[in-house]
Image (cartoon, rainbow, N blue to C red):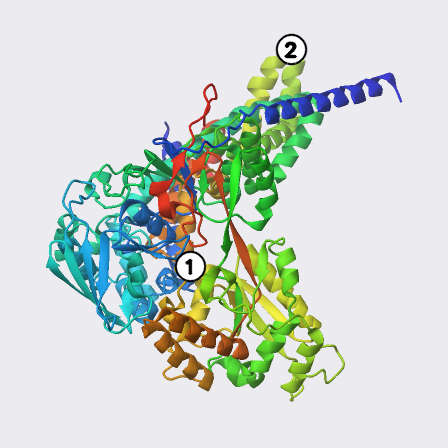
């Protein structure tokens, strides 16, 4: 690995750390500033004003925002993410339980989507008849909100028995996340391939008699990967945001559901912890995608 | 049309027919369902759903529905409110007696009872439980519901199997107050309580072996976000009428399914046996089809006792009261009640599966319900006349009523975002109030934001509902009394703001302290008449609670109170799968 690539990776890691801290601090501040607080359940359980006041004191909600945020930062330096007001447990334990589940789901969905979408994109770019069939399906899947995709698949699973709907099984949630993503990758790859196939170097290679299979699957596919990798960050972000609906419907014990519960319950430390881990996963995936782009295209190493 | 085009069209038609055939085949290959045999069958695993997961295994720290369900399955109370009949049943206390003034209750505890870990149950566990319940450091959300006149109960042990509970004041509902007090194992929890760590005890990471209870089941496994598995507590003490030990089931699996659509799909498919919550009106027709196929059973448990309500902020110091004094007038509330067509709410929001109601007490409250109460029937003309009586008339001919200064009469109604029933009711109310000239803005807020507005008293009007955990109104003084924190239109009044609220306070004080049941019913009837005459909150409809279970579930006694089926889990049993079928 040369020095350019190392310097490039170092810059990206520093940016990723900054991104993670800013996102999680923003989650803390936004949840704290949002109307209502963690005593909602105490009120709804008819605890009365005294119980609400005691809970607010115990949770530190009476102190100013900056002091509260400072406490969280102090904990963060020592890798202590605080204690969840909802679960009365350390946030680090809770996010550790859920982050692995989300990462597994996202990774499997990404792999499946790439395995379907990228080759299909190469094929549809070179076979217009196939494109005429695949493109409308892809567009429909891309336009389909995650909640509809997962409910549609659940219905199919119930009606046919082809997929298990038991909690903890992979097929349904992975497919629900992977299919729209595969469709997006297919569209991106297909467009990139069409442009690449018309580029002078590919035309020249074809004129030199490079076999069409090699031209398509080696030369053109590699070149067309650059724009696809360029939007990998956005794609992975979409994957994580879409996972909430999938986790809710399929009972997948992931980070999205935990974050949703944390925000709904105004659990400051848990919301910040979930945002931190979610941001870290996105940053890591982006980092890998950037490094992959830099390997594919050395010209990028000095510019990113 | 060219031959090629015809071929393509033919190919598409063939494909569509083929796809249809495959779909039809998949629909018709479900195993046949078998009729439920009459005899009770032991064993098997029942699969239920719940929309939220426990935040703690400690009922005294967190009192949400998931913890309530957990406690019902794994722990036991001294007495229990039968959620289907409303009557009080012996539980850990096998019999009891009270002093003539109803203040002192002597309870004889069952002997030779063991916790699930084998330790004996004695009166010291009861004392420990009440110590925990009222401890300031514990801040238990259960404590306020086990107080009488804001004072705790006093508990002392006479011997290992006799306890005496002294009420600080006479209390009409009697020992029903103990229905929400599961008895804790002192031998497991005393050390953490003494160390001031009780709030951090029995969290969801506690190994099941460290938990112990007196309920019919024990936790075997908890997979966060996915499921809880409970197994039969072999030390459970209860037997059925024929001397068979309970529970009948070997296991209960509670799957965490946050999405209600997914929950219904699982029930339809046969993947689960019991939905924890009631069936939504929009799901009824699909489930009726499956009932016709013999796959599920729909039980109507009764009319809900927590109808949606609309109320205005009647706090005289609120911005609304100061800026729009007409908003505090009783005739405005009467006008609203007359302006809204309850039948339309029943038909469009609940798809017919509801009853129009005119007050907080619905037919679901049984003997407490007064069908002869005066009703405010749908009458827009009378509503306009009532508005005119408080100075709200259309002064500029724009179709909207204006106050005496010429300002358009306008109200903002808050409701809960994402709660489709409330949002639909709010939309109908908005439309029908606008038809009589009152301009209404509906603002949907998410839960915490809405509660902040309600707690702070910074709202104008709201549509919400208040859940009750029992039928007896004497247990809900925080709603009826003017000083109560859930006297929602003007909570925690330093002294009654109106004469009629003072009268209700007085009647409810008598009602809740009188031991003569018939007199309690009579007094509460008077309260309802006063409420109807002053209408501090307007009620529209109460849904009929329909509970769905798979057809293989036997012994269910559905209740309108939550948990609708699993409150009596020890009596549930499963019809075995027919031989040769694949089962679930």
- Measuring from the top left, give residue B312's x and y in whole percent: 52, 75
Q: Is residue B313 above or below residue B296?
A: below
Based on the displayed image, in which of its 4 quarters is residue B227 positioned?
top left
Instruction: List the single residue furthest toward the bottom.
Output: B404
Horizontal side of B288 relative to B12 (left or right) equals left
In what element is the residue under mark 1? Answer: helix
Chain for numbered disc 2: A
Q: Earlier in the sequence, mark 1 or mark 2?
A: 1
- Spatial CA distance of label 1 from label 2 is 60 Å
Horizontal side of B430 relative to A22 (left or right) equals right
- Measuring from the top left, give residue A111's x and y in whole percent: 47, 27
Q: Is residue A204 above or below residue B356?
A: above
Closer-to-camera residue (B46/A192):
B46
Residue at the spot x=55%, y=18% of the render?
A: A218
Closer-to-camera residue (B23/A77):
B23
Give the residue number, with chain letter if any, for mark 1. A30
- Measuring from the top left, give residue B393's x and y in whole percent: 69, 83
Residue at the spot x=50%, y=73% of the render?
A: B459
Q: Is residue B428 above or below residue B492?
A: above
Give the residue number, with chain letter if any, for mark 2. A209
Closer-to-camera residue (B36/A40):
B36
Asked if residue B564 can be seen in this view, the reply is yes
Based on the displayed image, in which of its 4 quarters is residue B472 positioned?
bottom left
């Amino acid at each position: 690995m040369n020095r350019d690539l190392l310097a490039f990776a170092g810059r990206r890691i520093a940016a990723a750390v900054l991104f993670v801290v800013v996102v999680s601090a923003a989650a803390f501040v936004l949840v704290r500033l949002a109307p209502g607080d963690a005593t909602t359940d105490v009120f709804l359980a008819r605890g009365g004003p005294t119980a609400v006041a005691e809970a607010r004191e115990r949770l530190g909600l009476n102190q100013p925002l900056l002091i509260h945020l400072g406490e969280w930062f102090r904990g963060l330096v020592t890798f202590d993410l605080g204690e969840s007001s909802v679960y009365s447990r350390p946030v680090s334990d809770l996010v550790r339980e859920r982050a692995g589940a989300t990462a597994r789901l996202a990774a499997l969905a990404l792999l499946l989507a790439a395995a379907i979408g990228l080759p299909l994109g190469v094929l549809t770019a070179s076979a217009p008849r196939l494109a005429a069939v695949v493109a409308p399906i892809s567009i429909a899947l891309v336009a389909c909100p995650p909640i509809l995709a997962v409910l549609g698949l659940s219905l199919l699973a119930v009606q046919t028995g082809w997929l298990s709907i038991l909690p903890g099984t992979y097929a349904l949630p992975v497919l629900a996340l992977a299919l729209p993503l595969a469709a997006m990758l297919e569209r991106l790859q297909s467009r990139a391939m069409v442009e690449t196939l018309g580029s002078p170097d590919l035309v020249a290679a074809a004129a030199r008699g490079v076999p069409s299979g090699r031209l398509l699957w080696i030369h053109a596919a590699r070149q067309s990967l650059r724009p696809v990798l360029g939007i990998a960050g956005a794609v992975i972000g979409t994957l994580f945001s879409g996972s909430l609906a999938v986790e809710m419907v399929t009972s997948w014990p992931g980070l999205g559901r935990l974050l949703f519960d944390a925000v709904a319950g105004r659990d400051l430390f848990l919301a910040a912890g979930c945002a931190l881990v979610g941001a870290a996963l996105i940053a890591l995936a982006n980092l890998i995608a950037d490094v992959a782009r830099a390997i594919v295209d050395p010209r990028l190493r000095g510019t990113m | 049309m060219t031959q090629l085009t015809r071929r393509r069209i033919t190919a598409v038609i063939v494909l569509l027919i083929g796809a249809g055939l495959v779909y039809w085949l998949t629909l018709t290959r479900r195993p046949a369902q078998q009729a439920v045999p009459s005899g009770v069958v032991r064993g098997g695993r029942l699969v239920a759903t719940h929309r939220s997961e426990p935040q703690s295994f400690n009922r005294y720290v967190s009192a949400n529905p998931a913890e309530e369900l957990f406690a019902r399955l794994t722990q036991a109370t001294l007495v229990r409110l039968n959620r289907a009949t409303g009557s009080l049943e012996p539980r850990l206390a096998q019999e009891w007696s009270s002093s003539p003034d109803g203040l002192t209750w002597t309870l004889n505890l069952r002997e030779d009872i063991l916790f699930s870990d084998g330790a004996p149950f004695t009166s010291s566990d009861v004392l420990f439980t009440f110590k925990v319940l009222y401890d300031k450091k514990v801040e238990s959300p259960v404590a306020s519901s086990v107080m009488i006149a804001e004072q705790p109960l006093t508990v002392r042990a006479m011997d290992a199997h006799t306890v005496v509970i002294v009420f600080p004041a006479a209390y009409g509902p009697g020992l029903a107050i103990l229905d929400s007090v599961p008895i804790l194992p002192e031998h497991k929890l005393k050390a953490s309580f003494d160390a001031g760590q009780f709030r951090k005890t029995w969290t969801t990471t506690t190994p099941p072996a460290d938990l112990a209870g007196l309920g019919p089941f024990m936790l075997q496994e908890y997979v966060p976000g996915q499921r809880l598995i409970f197994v039969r507590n072999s030390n459970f003490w209860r037997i059925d009428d024929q001397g068979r030990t309970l529970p009948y089931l070997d296991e209960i699996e509670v799957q965490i399914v946050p999405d209600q659509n997914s929950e219904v799909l699982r029930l339809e498919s046969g993947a689960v046996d019991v939905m924890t919550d009631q069936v939504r009106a929009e799901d009824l027709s699909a489930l009726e089809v499956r009932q016709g196929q013999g796959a599920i059973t729909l039980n109507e448990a009764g009319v809900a006792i927590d109808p949606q309500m609309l109320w205005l902020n009647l706090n005289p110091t609120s911005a609304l009261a100061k800026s729009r004094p007409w908003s505090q007038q009783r005739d405005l509330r009467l006008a609203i009640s007359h302006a809204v067509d309850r039948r339309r709410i029943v038909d469009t929001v609940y798809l017919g599966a509801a009853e129009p109601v005119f007050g907080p007490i619905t037919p679901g409250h049984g003997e407490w319900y007064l069908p002869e109460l005066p009703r405010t029937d749908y009458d827009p003309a009378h509503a306009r006349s009532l508005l005119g009586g408080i100075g709200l008339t259309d002064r500029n001919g724009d179709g909207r009523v204006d106050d005496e200064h010429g300002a358009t009469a306008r109200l903002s109604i808050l409701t809960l975002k994402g709660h489709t029933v409330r949002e639909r009711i709010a939309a109908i109310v908005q439309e029908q109030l606008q038809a009589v000239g009152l301009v209404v803005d509906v603002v949907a807020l998410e839960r915490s934001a809405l509660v902040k507005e309600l707690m702070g008293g910074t709202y104008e009007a709201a549509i919400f509902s208040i859940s009750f955990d029992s039928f007896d109104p004497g247990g809900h003084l925080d709603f009826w009394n003017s000083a109560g924190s859930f006297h929602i239109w003007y909570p925690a009044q330093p002294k009654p703001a109106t004469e009629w609220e003072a009268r209700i306070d007085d009647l409810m004080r008598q009602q809740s302290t009188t031991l003569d049941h018939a007199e309690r019913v009579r007094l509460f009837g008077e309260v309802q008449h006063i409420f109807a005459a002053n209408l501090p909150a307007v009620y529209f409809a109460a849904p009929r609670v329909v509970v769905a279970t798979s057809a293989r579930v036997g012994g269910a006694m559905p209740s309108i109170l939550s948990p609708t089926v699993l409150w009596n889990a020890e009596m549930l049993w499963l019809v075995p799968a027919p031989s040769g079928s694949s089962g679930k």
